[in-house]
Amino acid sequence: MKSIVIHTQDSTYPVIVGEDAINELLGILKNLEPSKVLVVTDTNVDRLYSDFLIDKIRPTYTICKYVINSGEEAKSFDVFYDVQTFALKQQLDRKSVVIAFGGGVVGDLTGFVAATYMRGIPYIQVPTTLLAHDSAVGGKVAINHPEGKNMIGAFYQPKAVVYDSKFLKSLPVTELRSGFAEVIKHSLIKSESFYEFLVKEIQQLEDITSERLQRMILEGIQIKADVVTIDERELGLREILNFGHTLGHAVEAEAGYGKLSHGDCVAIGMLFATWLSNKLLQADLPYRELKTWFATIGFPVEVPDSYTNEQLIAKMVKDKKTKSNQIKMILLERIGETTSATFSKEELQSLLNE
Ligand code: NAD
Ligand code: ZN
């Protein structure tokens, strides 16, 4: 078992990673002395693991559980309201603790519930997807608005992240791949040696070993933690985490959320950003190697034919990170070192056309 400590402006918390990390949960709860514990989870995780989790804490604490439907639709005002109502009816108070038990959807929604219930009560992230190595760390919590994804939210750090890798064994391979894209992103923006480990050791996700999975989670989280420690509120450095996401988000929005996985879209975006870095910065990045590797893993490597570049650029301009019609992209000087460049719609259009 390994532990990483995250430091932000007004909090410090551990991220515990390992096959039996869940055993640390009781100790963390003990320090928080909760009056009650609310576990929020989704239908899939509930079916697989709720009993296991609750059996661990029930002897010591009063527990209630709220199960949301699995899927992105749960990050809605309606579900947010329902969880708050449930918490009020269960008489949770400011000494109660909420546990977000699931993937990024459960984490984002539950974190936002905790951030706003009685002006904020403590919560713990217990992630169950690989993507959650990204979403459970850093304190960005949110729900979606019909006008845009993650538009209503807060920066609210958990008291701890307990990342037990055995939960990942039941994760469908499409979900594993989606999370793996963010692992690759973390390596490309910050660590050449980590990238080299990934390319060399991971050619297939189906039979990944537990040791490799844990290393991916730990190194990915460490990189995210380093960035978030310096820039908790996305004022500067944190934008490098957006590598691959400018085009990625546009492809995802164009497909309709949930049609292509987030990671698949980010993979397409990372390939484009890599190609662009070589073209504009004369960076000597292994674009071909990356493309072949992505294809081997099962990522799509081209923007689907049915999307026109005009449609994609319209989506990029709509992105909340776009300012005054200038589209900003994170590029790579080399593996592990980022820079950024801004483009007008017309410039990007002609680059996409190439
Ligand atoms: P998810 O939570 O929807 O989980 C994916 C699917 O896997 C779901 O169907 C879920 O029920 C199922 N599942 C979860 N754990 C399982 C397990 N152990 N075994 C079997 N099935 C399991 O999606 P996700 O990919 O984890 O997260 C995506 C969300 O994360 C998006 O809403 C995105 O906006 C958000 N996100 C947030 C941040 C952040 O910084 N807050 C960063 C990245 C992504
Ligand atoms: Zn992402």
Image: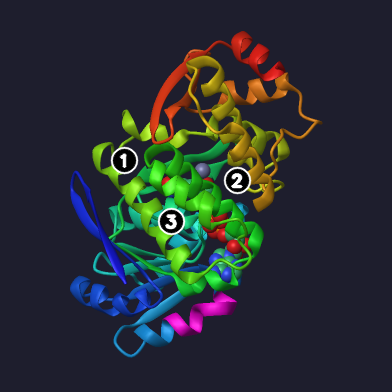
- What mark, if any, has residue 262 been given in the picture? 2
- What mark, if any, has residue 227 been given in the picture? 1
Q: Which amino acid type corresponds to the residue marked 2 in the rendered image?
A: His
Q: Which amino acid type corresponds to the residue marked 1 in the rendered image?
A: Val
Is 289 left, or right, of 96 in this rendering? right
Question: Which residue is farthest right?
Answer: 306
In the figure, 10 relative to 349: above or below? below
Asked if the beta carbon under badge 2 is closer than 8 A to the nearest atom of ligand 2, the reply is: yes
In space, the residues marked 1 and 3 are separated at their CA atoms by: 14 Å
In space, the residues marked 2 and 1 are separated at their CA atoms by: 21 Å
Front position in the image: 249 or 197: 197
In space, the residues marked 3 and 2 are separated at their CA atoms by: 14 Å
Tell me the quarter of the picture where residue 121 sits: bottom left
Question: Which residue is farthest bottom?
Answer: 59
Front position in the image: 92 or 4: 4
Q: Earlier in the sequence, mark 3 or mark 2?
A: 3
Q: Residue at x 27, y 64 (%)?
A: 3
Q: Residue at x 32, y 72 (%)?
A: 1
Ligand 1 is in which quadrant of the figure? bottom right
In magenta segment, residue 51: yes
Q: Residue at x 47, y 26 (%)?
A: 331
The location of residue 318, given as percent across then percent down, is: 58, 24
**Taken as a whole, is the magenta stretch helix, strand or loop?**
helix
Which residue has dot 3 on it? 133
In magenta segment, residue 239: no
The location of residue 116, given as percent across then percent down, is: 35, 52
In the figure, 182 relative to 271: above or below? below
Is label 1 in a helix, a strand or a loop? Answer: helix
Q: What residue range appears in magenta?
A: 46-53
Front position in the image: 174 or 319: 174
Asked if the beta carbon under badge 3 is closer than 8 A to the nearest atom of ligand 1, the reply is: no
Q: Residue at x 54, y 22 (%)?
A: 278
